Structure formats: C-alpha cells, structure tokens
Amino acid sequence: MSSTSATPTLDPSTDPQAGPACEKCHAPLKKATVTVCSRCGWYPSLGIFVEIAHDFEAAFNPELTAEERPPAPTHLQVWARLLPWWGWTLIGTVLAIIAVSIGVRLASPTETFRTTWAVSQLVAGAILAFACHATAFFMAASDDSDIGLLDAFVKPLRAWLRHFADLPERFWLTEAACFGLVAALSAALIIGGIPYSKLLDWKIKAPPKQSLMGAVMSQAQKVEGEKKKLEDAVSDFAGQAGDGALAGDVQTKPAERKNSDCLIIGVLLNPQGGIHQFVLATDVNGRLVYAGKVTAKIPPEEEPQLVAQLKAIQTPKPFVNAPDGAIWLKPQFTCLVSYTKQNAQGRLAELKFEEMRGELKLPW
C-alpha cells in the first residue's frame, strides 16, 4: 500500500534559497538591504506601512518583475483619484439633496404638502447654513486676531478660505454648510410653491400720516372742552350729500383714484356680527372732519379678533360730528382708503377700502 505526500510549498520569506522576501505580502526583494517593500509598503525596521508611489517606482526601476509592478488602475480608480474623498462626498451630498427635491416636486400628493415641505426645507437649510457660517467665523477669528466681527458680513468668504485650506480637517463643518445651503436653494428653485407674501408679512401695519395724527390731537383737545350736544352736532350735517358721489360732481370720465389715511370713528355690523362698514374721519388743513362710510374688507381669519377689539373701545358719542346710526369708537384704529374726489367739507367720493393701518398711541 503506497502513500502519497504533497510536495511542500516553501514560503519565500522563510526559505533561504528563495532569496529575501517581504514578511507581509511575501513579494521577493531584489536586495537584502532593501528596507521597504515596493509592493505593499511594509517598513520592517519601523513596523509600519508607508505610502509607495507605484508609478514613480515603476518608471525608475525598470528591473522590477511583473509581480513587483503594481496592477494597472481601473477607470473607476482613475476617476476616483481626480478628487480627494471629501470632494466626492460633497458632490454626493449635493446630488442627493437635488434628487430628493426633484422627487418632492414631481410626487407631491397635494399642493399643501409641497408648500409645507418647501417652507420647512428652506427654513431648516437657511438656519443650518447660517449656524455653520457663524461657527467657521469664530474658529477663524480665534486663530487670527486680524479678523473682526464685521468680516462675518463684509468679507464672508475670508473665514471659509482659511477653513478650506485645512481640509479635510473639520470636514464635518463643510459638509453641514453645504447641506444647509443646497437644501435652501433647492427648496426655492426646485420644489417651489413657497408663499413669499405670507412669509414676509409680519402683520406690521404702516403708521398713519403725521397730518392725521395732528388732526386727531387737535380734535381731542377740542372735544375735551366742548359742551355741544350730540343732537346739535348731527344737525350741522343736515342737507349734506349721502355717502355716494358728491352733490354737484359730474364725472365725464373715470377719475384718478387717490389714497388717504382715515381715522375709524364708528363701525356698522352685519346681521352675522361681522364688520359691514367703517365710519371714517380725515384731516382737512389740520382739522378732523367726517369723510364718509366705506365697506370693509377684512380677512376672515382676522375679523373676529378685530370685532372684539372694536367693541372694547365703544363710546357713547362720535369723536367727530357724523350722521347717527353706528357704533361709535374711541380714536384708536386707522385705515387706508382710496377715493376719486374730496369736496370742501372733506367728504370723500367713491370710497374703497385698501388696508388697515397702525393703531394710534394717544397720551390718554
């Protein structure tokens, strides 16, 4: 019975007849005095791996064998070497955000969903980008005393240029800033549907003109010392024209409309308890006079709160002599109206409500 035995394979690193070899990759070494393996970069005397420029080694060492020569790089490896790893990471981040934004734009189930997503992405991205910019500025300012606080706004790229020079150190900051900036831009330019008018409307009403304020103050001083009864005040307006076109005004062509700030001295409510008309007063040469009635157009979501505020400032008498039949108010709210003509008594023709103005802050 015969037995067979496999021929042992000698390890070049242990076989003295095979010559010197690398103890890590077992690649043969040309000379025993070679301290670094040209294939894997093992440095035995230091016990570490070092980076080997394979192209340089192949060009200046033509005597290297096929085993010692590094394999030819693939097309993917060639493209990968064009940019550092963090550069490809930034490109991937940008493409991912753009792809998600396009998906939301095309696959949104409703317009409300698309608007909500776009606004949330815009706000979150802007906040993240601003926070990263502030962080980069403070990091640069801590290392360079020449960077001042105004440089964050006047020279915003100065801090980032210093940061880019140290990449990939603190790469997380660059990645976060890129994410926030691209997310905000994608929300505005790709997703769309952002109601800019509502975002910029901070519910700040424009203040009335100073001339109206002066007329209100003069009328307030007059009311303080006035003993005239309400019946006499109403009778002063007997025979005047109604709230429509002014008497004696003949319009041959559409007149140009003008704007005027008016004080709301009274309100007429509809059967449902909403605002129907405002009773207005305006200034004529520094004197506050009755201007007419205008149909109010208040947004439905704001009307209940405004009605409650108007009821809280009711007064038994009108602040300015005016025809009866309204809920009289203290001089607090103003509005902007447009009209076609104003007569000598101050009445405004073809009144049209434009918007609410700011509230008056009177000393009493």
Image: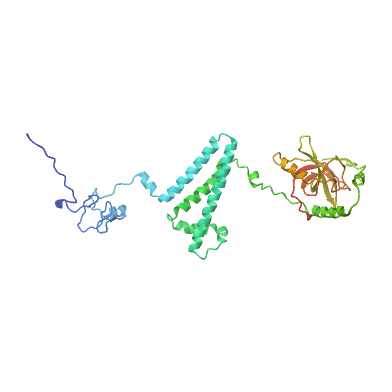
Query: Looking at the picture, how far across and down is residue 112, in whole percent?
Result: 60, 37
Q: Which residue is outermost to the left?
A: 1
- Note whether 210 is above or below 143 in the view shown: above
Q: Is residue 257 visible?
A: no
| Residue at 45% across, 45% down | 92
| Residue at 79% across, 44% down | 338
Query: Looking at the picture, how far across and down is residue 278, in whole percent?
Result: 80, 42
Q: Which residue is at the front of the view, 43 or 327?
A: 327
149 displayed left or right of 328: left
Q: Quadrant of the C terminus?
A: bottom right
Picture quadrant of residue 294:
top right
Q: Is residue 160 visible?
A: yes
332 displayed left or right of 165: right
Q: Quadrant of the N terminus?
A: top left
Q: Which residue is at the front of the view, 272 or 29?
A: 272
Query: Looking at the picture, how far across and down is residue 252, in whole percent?
Result: 86, 40
